[in-house]
Image (spheres, rainbow, N blue to C red):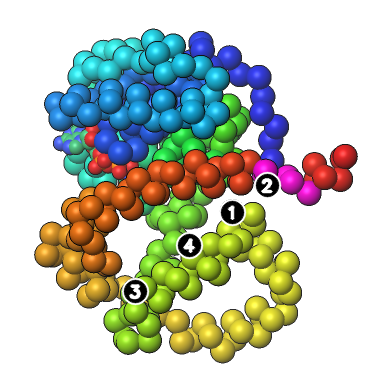
Amino acid sequence: MNEKKNIDTKNIPVGVVGLGLMGCSIATCLLIAGHPVKAIAPVETDLLHAGKRITEHLTKSKEEGLTPSSPQSLLKNLTITTDYSELKDCALVIECTLENQEIKKSVYEKIEAVIRPDAILTSNTSAIPISILQKLTKHPERFLGLHWAEPSHTTRFLEIICGELSDITKGEYLYDLSHSWGKEPTLVKKDIRGFITNRLMYAMYREACYLVENGYATVEDVDRACRNNAGYWMTLVGVFRWMDLTGVPAYHTVMKDLFPTLNNQTTIPKLIDDIVKAGGRGVANAHGFHSYTPEEAKLWEETFKEFSYEIRKLALKYPADVVKKKLKK
Ligand SMILES: NC(=O)c1ccc[n+]([C@@H]2O[C@H](COP(=O)([O-])OP(=O)(O)OC[C@H]3O[C@@H](n4cnc5c(N)ncnc54)[C@H](O)[C@@H]3O)[C@@H](O)[C@H]2O)c1
């Protein structure tokens, strides 16, 4: 892993376009890292909540020791506006709008009309291939994926994705820069739908739906197994180190007999289809895989926020190079 380089973030203005759930936590992360942030609200409703949400994140971040700076001093670096021309000095712009190609295309037109020729344009898309999105822009070589995990100011996850036409040196620049954001980034040099983490996670979501739909276990049982198995090691190691730690040959043996039985359906599972068609969004409207009273749903949201600060503390004790650091002592 790269060491954090001394990059003067205060001279690197960054634009965030789209101030929903992720745009607000990305803006928070960038403010804590010292960047001037131009936050663009493509829809008026963003203006109603973005300032409040970012202030709450900054207040909690100060309380939790993520930053020594007061929310008031960090907020001086933040501009929230509907006016895209505020992006004109930005060295980097992060698009964070709905996962919809048409919407993203119209937003790129507005961004490219005002940004500098040397500015890097990125998308936080979860799964639209960067090679497709970059073709919606005038300068595909400066377009890359920058895939964050919510809440962006507490998680150390970041994927930097090069599309077919991306200039890899820009990916390398973002890789270095993102160390100043508290990230342990991954540079995905060759574009693939879902990038890395969503390919891994969706394999798990598919199998989880299969197990429930076919009566092997309940939603509660599948969740309990995930939390208490992978949940106990995934903050320390990834799947390969996990196999190293627990004995590689056993995995070799199991793969032979288990792989042919794993689900590989290519259609959307009925379990999730029924929920979405009935309007379920999860805790956001107290209608998901589990049942919730509105009060329970709200408490789950709050508990997740609280947990994200707690797990960050544990994660910081175990960086990717934890063993190398121990050897140096
Ligand atoms: N939520 C996650 O955990 C997560 C994780 C990784 C990546 N992402 C990706 O980040 C992006 C944003 O996700 P989110 O969870 O913040 O969504 P969100 O629903 O909270 O926010 C979406 C934002 O899109 C913008 N928007 C809505 N309608 C628009 C329109 N007609 N024109 C222009 N802009 C419009 C608004 O700024 C709105 O706040 C998506 O591409 C999503 O796939 C989300």
Q: Is residue 43 above or below residue 315?
A: above
Looking at the image, residue 220 sits to the left or right of residue 255; the answer is left
Residues tagged 2 and 4 counted as in contact (Cβ below 8 A): no
Residue 217, given in percent of the width and then of the height, sits at 37, 82
Residues tagged 2 and 1 counted as in contact (Cβ below 8 A): yes
In this rendered view, identify the residue nearer to me: 90 or 229. Answer: 229
Q: Residues within 10 Å of mark 4 (few under 14, many from 20)?
A: few
**Residue type, numbered disc 2:** Tyr
Residue 184 picture quarter:
top right
Distance of label 4 from label 3 (alpha carbons): 19 Å
Precedes in sequence: disc 4 or disc 3: 4
Distance of label 2 from label 3 (alpha carbons): 31 Å
Precedes in sequence: disc 2 or disc 4: 4
Question: Element type at marker 2?
Answer: loop
Q: Residues within 10 Å of mark 3 (few under 14, many from 20)?
A: some
Precedes in sequence: disc 2 or disc 1: 1
Identify the residue position indicated by label 1 in the image. 235
Question: Element type at marker 4?
Answer: helix
Identify the residue position indicated by label 2 in the image. 318
Tell me the number on the disc at residue 219. 3
**Residue type, numbered disc 1:** Thr
